[in-house]
Image: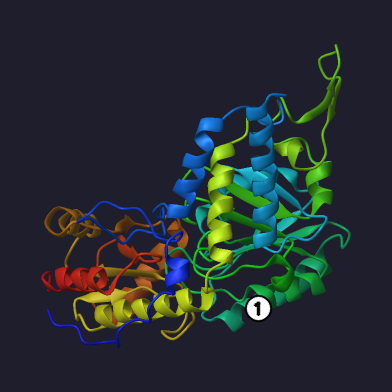
Amino acid sequence: MSVTLVPSLPALPTAASAPLDVLGVPGEINLDYAASAPCARAAADAVNELLPWYASVHRGAGALSRRCTLAYEKARQTIGDFFGARADDHVIFTRNTTDALNLLGRALPAGTTVVTFAGEHHANLLPWPRGSVRLPVPSDPAGAVRALAAALSELRRDSNPALPVLVAVTGASNVTGERWPVAELARVAHRHGARLALDAAQLAPHEPVDLLALDVDYLAVSGHKLYAPFGAGVLIGRADWLDAAPPYLAGGGATRRVGPATHDVTWATGPARHEGGTPNLLGAVALAAVCTALAGADRSALAAREQALLARLRSGVAALPHVVELRTFGPDAPRVGIVSFVVAGWDSAEVAARLAARHRIGVRDGLFCAHPLARRLLAEAAGRSGRRDLPATALRASIGLGSTVDEVDRLLAALAELG
């Protein structure tokens, strides 16, 4: 298959390339970054450097423990700075975005109403209490802002205005890659006295995310999507709800004092309150190392290169008559490096297996842990294309650091063979 779509990609700055090189297996084409991104050299190097010193955190007086405690708290500061945390925000280490949003769900004050959209990942649909409001998927970003404004106006009119409200939204869809208007949604939320939590799992690997600039109240992110696959994530945000909530994990490190009686416990305040047990030191250090590497890189150049590669991928998909892209907004809506699609007449799991076996290409198939949105978009794709032979699940190709023109072209050539 011949693909002539986009001029050659901009070159990466040489000075920024080494720590942001990603590890991989020669000959294997990884186009599944949205599920778990490969490990950045910076993360692997930071872990390898610390491993000989590995010891307890916050629990030892020896040199190894002191160094590990310092590394852990330095990682917290680095990550908070990278994401624009305010001086009084908490930076709490979790396992991933799902864990972070579940923590926030447990910390909500009594009577809190959570407002989400039906286009969210399950991590931002399932943790919230009964009585939460799920708004329909909008047709464009401006529609999302209008829908939220209308919903919050009605909610404030019909319920106790003193009860807290949390708006929980994604920064970029894990199904389509489409960007959501986070700053505008935050303004609407604050105008109605609500707070906003941002699921930045898919947005943060592709462009800077700054709590202060976006004016969001809470941010959740996963290390494994940000080139630091060592089991860490973070919840960053306002302290009052978090300090008033019961500990997410009751145990050692989360307490100030434990008395002789069963419930004679004084819990810690600050991040330690929700970090019971031995912390994931290596995950924290790995994530901080990637944040440092990205902070020192030319993010504009990285984004320009990814967007050129994304345009090549989307144009190639559009040129294949038997392949239909999924989208929520218009075709020109801003997006990150994620493309979901279906191949007419082919089961998506069969296509994924064929790509892996015959071409050594890894993509995702299924409904991407966003079942309500994916099913809706599959139905819309059938209506838009007029095809009756589209499968019930989809395929997703996702790119990032380390992705190349050759990898995209090989995927497009492999898809062309299915026509």
| Residue 278 sits in quarter | top right
Does 40 sit left or right of 300 as displayed? left
Question: Residue 246, percent across and down?
Answer: 77, 36
Residue to which mark 1 is pinned: 145
Residue located farthest toward the top when viewing the structure as drawn: 260
Residue located farthest toward the right when viewing the structure as drawn: 162
User: In the rendered image, which quarter contains the C terminus?
Assistant: bottom left
User: In the rendered image, which quarter contains the N terminus?
Assistant: bottom left
Question: Residue 211, percent across and down?
Answer: 70, 66
Name which residue lies at 37% across and 75% down. 380
Name which residue lies at 14% across and 74% down. 416
* In front of the other: 159 or 245: 245
Question: Residue 376, percent across and down?
Answer: 42, 67
Give the structural element (helix, strand or loop) at label 1. Answer: helix
Does 164 sit left or right of 104 as displayed? right
Name which residue lies at 12% across and 69% down. 418
Q: Is residue 293 above or below residue 192?
A: above
Does 306 sit left or right of 173 as displayed? left
For the residue carrying disc 1, how many other residues have a C-alpha within 10 Å: few (<14), some (14-19), or many (20+)?
Answer: many
| Residue 311 sits in quarter | bottom left
* In front of the other: 194 or 406: 406
* In front of the other: 173 or 297: 297
